[in-house]
């Protein structure tokens, strides 16, 4: 199977258990225009922020952000500056660090006992002793949120786990994710924290990697298992990638008790590339419901009017992120 910024002047008001959910061909990043990932974060509240509070978009997620990827304008925000655990959303950073190191994707990695989850006690279909390529480990970590695969990727990094985590935090700093911290490669540790604003930057950066786009939008993947006649099927933890009504470019889910249900995506809605971040959604299906509500809102007359109004808003240079204030109203 083929493995299938924020610049701008958006005026945004915010209201506010278990992760697992070669060249360009080798997964190297390619540039995406119209986005300033090194932009400085600013917090603003002015009179026009009322447009967001009366947008009619009511989400179940505790924190959320919707950004036009082309212009960098934020169309909606809710507690977008609130720092919280991000669970397996972490694995997008894991994948970028692996690909940035340009390690051989066909190199074999063995699942070791140290890759077992001793923190949450989560189950894995990858038994200790299983050998898989780095490419397949990325496939299963991103698509099916396999924690042992993500742990093995960090362990097999030059310098091992400590060097890998240090590289994750350097990458976050390079993306100006100033309110983000990583302590492991899986997201099982609730000390992996970030904000919706920072995660917009991370999703946009992940979109620059063709391999990440391909893997995270694959609906399912069959894996041959030694000693078994039937192949083992791994499914994407985001049901929306198998929904023909959606045009998704990057996807990742996450869940631990401390983080709640999370979902980040790059998707084309109403013919515009958007970045969606949904954190701490209560209820297993609420993050999917919130994504559907955002899509319906974007395609509605109200969403069209808001985008038109935003397009006519004077730009404040292309070096700032206009982000959420602290009002409590969505």
Image (cartoon, helix red, strand yellow):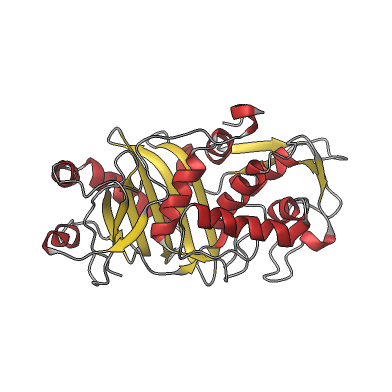
Question: Which of the 4 image quarters holds residue 176?
Answer: bottom left
Seen in the image, is 247 located left or right of residue 163? left
Could you say where residue 181 lies in the image, as x and y percent from the top left? 55, 65
Could you say where residue 227 lies in the image, as x and y percent from the top left? 88, 40
User: Nearest the camera: 268 or 20?
Assistant: 268
Relative vertical location of residue 119 with respect to residue 142 in this rendering, above or below? below
Relative vertical location of residue 138 with respect to residue 166 in this rendering, above or below? above
User: Tag count in the figure?
Assistant: 0
Q: Is residue 210 visible?
A: yes
User: Nearest the camera: 36 or 287?
Assistant: 36
Q: Residue at x 18, y 62 (%)?
A: 53
Q: In the picture, which quadrant includes the N terminus?
A: top right
Q: Residue at x 45, y 43 (%)?
A: 240
Could you say where residue 189 lies in the image, as x and y percent from the top left? 62, 68
Seen in the image, is 20 located left or right of residue 291? right
Q: Residue at x 65, y 37 (%)?
A: 221
Q: Residue at x 74, y 60 (%)?
A: 161
Q: In the picture, which quadrant includes the C terminus?
A: bottom left
Could you say where residue 201 lies in the image, as x and y percent from the top left? 43, 51
Q: Is residue 286 visible?
A: no
């Amino acid at each position: 199977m083929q493995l299938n910024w924020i610049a701008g002047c958006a005026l945004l008001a915010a209201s506010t258990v278990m992760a697992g959910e070669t060249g360009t061909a080798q997964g190297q990043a390619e540039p995406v225009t119209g986005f300033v990932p090194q932009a400085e974060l600013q917090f603003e509240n002015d009179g026009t922020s009322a447009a967001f509070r009366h947008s009619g978009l009511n989400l179940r997620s505790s924190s959320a952000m919707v950004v036009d990827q082309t212009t960098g304008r934020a169309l909606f925000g809710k507690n977008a500056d609130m720092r919280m655990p991000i669970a397996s959303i972490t694995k997008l950073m894991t994948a970028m660090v692996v690909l940035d190191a340009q390690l051989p994707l066909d190199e074999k990695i063995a699942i070791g006992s140290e890759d077992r989850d001793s923190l949450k006690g989560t189950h894995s279909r990858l038994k200790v002793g299983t050998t898989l390529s780095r490419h397949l480990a990325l496939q299963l970590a991103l698509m099916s949120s396999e924690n042992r695969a993500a742990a093995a990727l960090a362990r097999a990094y030059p310098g091992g786990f400590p060097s890998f985590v240090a590289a994750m935090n350097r990458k976050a700093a390079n993306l100006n994710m100033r309110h983000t911290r990583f302590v492991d490669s899986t997201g099982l540790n609730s000390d992996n924290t970030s904000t919706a604003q920072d995660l917009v930057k991370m999703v946009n950066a992940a979109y620059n990697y063709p391999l990440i786009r391909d893997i995270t939008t694959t609906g399912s993947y069959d894996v041959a298992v030694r000693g078994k006649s039937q192949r083992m099927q791994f499914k994407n933890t985001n049901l929306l990638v198998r929904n023909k009504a959606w045009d998704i470019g990057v996807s990742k889910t996450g869940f631990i008790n401390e983080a709640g249900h999370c979902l980040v995506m790059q998707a084309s809605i109403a013919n515009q590339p958007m970045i969606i971040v949904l954190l701490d959604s209560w209820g297993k299906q609420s993050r999917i419901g919130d994504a559907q509500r955002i899509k319906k809102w974007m395609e509605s007359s109200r969403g069209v009017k808001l985008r038109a109004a935003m397009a006519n808003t004077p730009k404040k240079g292309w070096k700032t992120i206009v982000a959420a204030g602290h009002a409590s109203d969505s």
